[in-house]
Image (tube, rainbow, N blue to C red):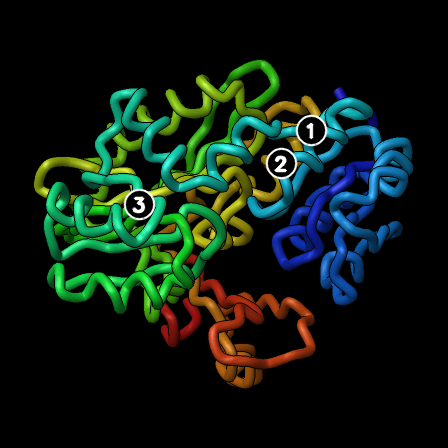
Amino acid sequence: MLPPGSTIGILGGGQLGRMLAVAAAQLGYKVHIYAPDAESVAAEVTAHHSQAAWDDEPRLAAFAAACDIVTFEFENVPVDTVRFLSGHVAVHPGAKALEIAQDRLAEKTFVAGLGGRTAPFASVPDRATLDASLGEIGAPAILKTVRMGYDGKGQARLGTAADADTAWETIGRHAAILEGFVAFEHEFSVILVRGLDGEVRYWDSTVNVHEGGILATASLPAPPIVAAQQAEARAMMAEIAAALDYVGVLTGEFFATDAGPVFNEMAPRVHNSGHWTIEGAVASQFDNHIRAIAGLPLGSTATRQLPVVMRNLIGADIAAIPALLADENCHVHHYSKTEVRDGRKLGHATWAGAAPGAPPA
């Protein structure tokens, strides 16, 4: 059990790191942010900050020496960085989860190997392979870069095989995975926390609505089909977590279909669709992630009251904060990012126990 006053290192300086740092402070821990970026909204709320490259081994070693345990706030931290740090300090979750989540082909293969239901998929290492893969998978389909890409980036939809050239150019001619189209009713998340002792707890699954490939809202209660498929999806995520010997918060995104829940992707970290848990659950995803990696008892993941709606504030949406603050049921989170641009997540708003715009109880 990590005693109060210890230092938790966080790799990455974005809003997830910021919210983790706040949760850590509430439990009596200091936080040290390590990130190469000049702007770090996470470092604004922490005592220590190292701005250095992911491959700067002397700086990484100094960072490890200053921390009692290390975690990460996004899945694009280089695996080699985590492996290096793991030789100096405990890192949770570990490099294996990060390595699989960074490679869409490895991720789908891993989950399918555990018996998970996925979209049909095929490896597309080059343009020549794309035609053969389309013959195998069929169209419509989605072509995704194997590595990197999030919030709809690094993807192209193919309505027919005739779209192959355009799709290949759209993703920058990178190694890719072709995924067959999945007919679904809703998208939903399974967010779990797994402790050092293997205990697993789950938050209620929100129904997620995306706009332009970016999460717009996550809300409860979820539609009946999501509620009916939640148990099977949870069992799949628990199996994934056990196979990875995972510690911390792990998120899986699923499609609710007539055939049951279809695994889409996982994130080895706290997740945007779980921001509602700060006000909407007894213990938030950020609180429980810190508890898990520190070896503390896990907090209750129960939902406090319904309904719950979390809305992302993207780009110019951030200008709506004064109006949102006038809503007595609304909880506003501003990430303190200075540059406003289309598609950038700048904050979020949550309504717990009331619908957006509803009068006070």
The first of marks 3 and 1 along the sequence is 1
Note whether 260 is above or below 87 in the view shown: below
Q: In the rendering, at what x and y percent does residue 150 appear? A: 45, 57
Amino acid type, callout 2:
Val
Please name the residue that numbered disc 1 is placed on. 83
Left of 25 or right of it: where is 310?
left
Name the image quarter holding the C terminus.
Answer: bottom left
Q: Determine the residue positioned at 34% across, 53% down.
A: 144
Image location (x, y in percent) of residue 29: 81, 38
> Marks 3 and 1: which is nearer the front?
3
Q: Which mark is residue 79?
A: 2
| Label 3 sits on residue | 124
Are circles 3 and 2 on residues that touch, CB within 8 Å? no
**Nearer to me, 247 or 182:** 182
In the image, residue 276 above or below residue 326? above
Q: What amino acid is at disc 1?
A: Arg
- Whether residue 300 is visible, yes or no, is no
Helix, strand or loop for disc 3: strand
Q: Please tell me whether mark 1 sits on a helix, a strand or a loop.
A: helix
Q: Which mark is residue 94?
A: none
Amino acid at pointer 3: Val
At horizontal 78% and vertical 37% (from top left) the residue drawn is: 8
* Whole-number angstrom distance, CA of label 3 to CA of label 1: 28 Å
Q: Residues within 10 Å of mark 1 (few under 14, many from 20)?
A: some
Mark 3 or mark 2: whose residue is earlier in sequence: 2
Q: Are marks 1 and 2 in contact (CB under 8 Å)?
A: yes
Cα–Cα span, label 3 and label 2: 23 Å
Residue at 55% x, 41% y is 269
Is residue 65 visible to us here? yes
Residue located 12% across and 41% down the image = 136
Image position of 314 (left or right of 5): left
